[in-house]
Amino acid sequence: MGCTQSYDDPAAKDDKRWTSSLQQDATADRQLKKLLLLGPGNSGKSTFFKQLLKIHGDGFNDPKKFHTADITRAIYDSIIGQMKAIIHQCEEFEYQLSETEQKSADFILDLPRDVDINETIAYHINILWNDQMILDSFEHRTNLGIVDSCPHFFTSIDRISKSDYSPSEDDILLVRTPTTGVISSRFSINNHQFMIFDVGGQRSERN
């Protein structure tokens, strides 16, 4: 009497395993809420994205998203660029600076691009930020490129000018860093899973 040997078809087992995996992925994807942040440049999308990271994510520990050297460079450029913009705003308002403040204004306006903040630059920033005409120019600004976070950096200029400066969480949160292309991160909020996408506000930033 003959006998037969039963065995599972390896191909069928692989197909069953892949089908089960795809079904699990599909279920997880349906439960994942996807949010896309859109808006013009300087509308606060990236700041909101960073706030979510700080509160509900892993903070600013991902070197792919927050490289210390890049953040420091952005802070230096922002401080100098914003102070230059305020000085120009002061000139448009025809506010008169005293001799000392005007020398500091001329010094800042003459700074080249990509310069690091040092104690000399901090000295002139302090002089200007303590001048009433500069403060009035900021308060009554019409240039939308002068952002609300300026005071944080100007009042912290002595700390930022130190050679061992490392950006704080507030520095990272408040600095304006244009989004290039699309960045994303996953959050868990009240047991709900979210995937947030931050898209460059300017058309040229969407690579």
Image: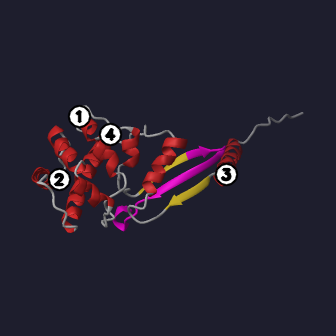
Q: Nearer the viewer, residue 180 or 160?
A: 160
Of tags 2 and 4, the one toward the viewer is 2
Query: Residue 31 bears which disc, if any?
Result: 3
Q: Quadrant of residue 61?
A: top left
Q: Of helix, strand and loop, which one carries label 2?
A: loop
Tell me the residue at 28%/58% (across/down).
136
Badge 3 local density, few (<14 within 10 Å), some, or many (20+)?
few
**Which disc is residue 97 wearing?**
none
* Nearest to N terminus: mark 3 or mark 4: 3
- Mark toward the start of the polypeptide (1 vs 4): 4
- Nearer the N terminus, badge 2 or badge 1? 2
Mark pair 1, 4: CA separation: 15 Å
Between disc 3 and disc 2, whose residue precedes? 3
Mark 4 is surrounded, within 10 Å at the Cα level, by few (under 14), some (14 to 19) or many (20 or more) other residues, namely some
| Residue 78 in sight in this render | yes
Distance CA(mark 1)–CA(mark 3):
47 Å
